[in-house]
Image (cartoon, rainbow, N blue to C red):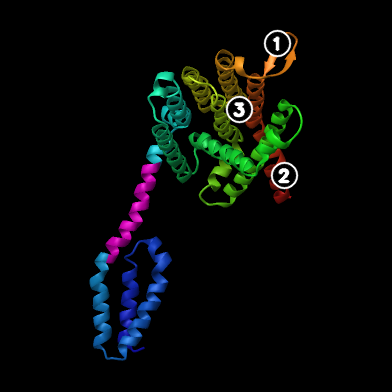
Amino acid sequence: MNNASLWFTRLYAQLLALYPRRFQADFAEEMKAVFALRIKEAARAGIGQPLCLTLREMGALPLALWAAYTRERRPLIMQKRLVRWFIHEPGSWQEILLASLPFLALCLVLGTFSFKAMEAGLSPLVGLGLMGLIILALALLGIAGMLVRLPRWSMPYAGVLIAGAVFLALNLLGLQDLFFGGMQGPWWLRMAAFELLYLVVLFAATLLSLRLARKIALTSIFFEQVRKDWSLISFAMYGGAFTLVIGMYEEIANGGLYILLTILPFLFSTWVYLRQPSLRRRLTALSLGITVAMGIALVAHLLRMDLFSPAVFQVGGMVVTRSILSIFLSWLLGLGMLFVPMLLPRISFDKQAQVQTA
């Protein structure tokens, strides 16, 4: 390569310094190598060809710089918007509202359209479409929470996702049909066994999710937050337990008022959890929220369905029907979902940390 070609190559290298730093780190060396090769090939045709090539590159430089800085600025703008919309002070009304949206949206929609007058005038297609839009909106909020490193308000969204995925997986594997179809034994024992299995698989899925979060750059900060406050996993499972409560109304006709009342304990417990620094009080509030919500579902069953529910066994003078027992076992499962995550630091991560420090 002659002196003129070397000079053109050095000039091009200097021009690359005008690009954004991230762009330079990713592409500068490769662009230098490609330009040097093109200059070397052009030099074989005489001094004029390298000069023309360099002038063409300089003429295209302003547009290339504008495109590079636009691409650089766009993610920063989007990141700032996400932070402004979805990162809030602990205990602020914005944080509480974002955390409460799954409970508000699903209870309001399901409760409103479960009234007899509304249900009669609503076609199944419209109802499914409306529920699909609500679920899509909540899913998008959950994705936004992931993009801003899973703040506290996004935990119920994650809990609904994990709990739903585990239940779907058990159904696809045919385990629910096994417990309630092919397996012999009393109904209450089969249901208790299935819920115990569900809790074990849910715990394993949560543990797996935390291990993945530890390794993925997007969620690694979240893992460190969980290490400082394991009740975040309990708050996530609180969202999963919400689906248990809603499931109690599946066979109750015209139960809209009770579904709407269910909003109140969930909103109150969410407010206490996000505003209360004491771990014991936060877990107590979440437990109380599930207990009161299940109590409302129990009242709905007793008043609207329990006369038609088959009896399971009798305790003294009280007949325990299948619906009552189902609510009781689901309540125990919901409490288990809250308190089992407290075992996570003892079972897994604290032991790993001790091994690493040793």
Residue placed most toward the observer, 60 or 246: 246
- Residue 50 screen position, x and y as percent: 28, 84
Residue placed most toward the observer, 194 or 92: 194
Q: Tell which circle, 1 or 3, labels the residue nearer the N-terminal end.
A: 3
Q: Is residue 90 visible?
A: no
Report crowding for label 2: few under 14, some 14 to 19, many 20 or more residues within 10 A (C-alpha).
few
Query: In the image, is 48 to the left or to the right of 164?
Result: left
* Main SS class of the magenta portion in the image: helix
Q: Which residues are magenta?
A: 64-82
Q: CA distance from mark 1 to mark 2?
A: 48 Å
Q: Tell which circle, 3 or 2, labels the residue nearer the N-terminal end.
A: 3
Q: CA distance from mark 1 to mark 3?
A: 38 Å
Q: Element type at marker 3? A: helix
Q: Are marks 1 and 3 in contact (CB under 8 Å)?
A: no
Residue beneath the point at 71% across and 26% down:
188
Q: Element type at marker 2? A: helix
Q: Residue tagged by mark 1?
A: 318
Residue beneath the point at 59% across and 40% down:
168
The amino acid type of the residue labelled 3 equals Leu
Q: Residue tagged by mark 3?
A: 279
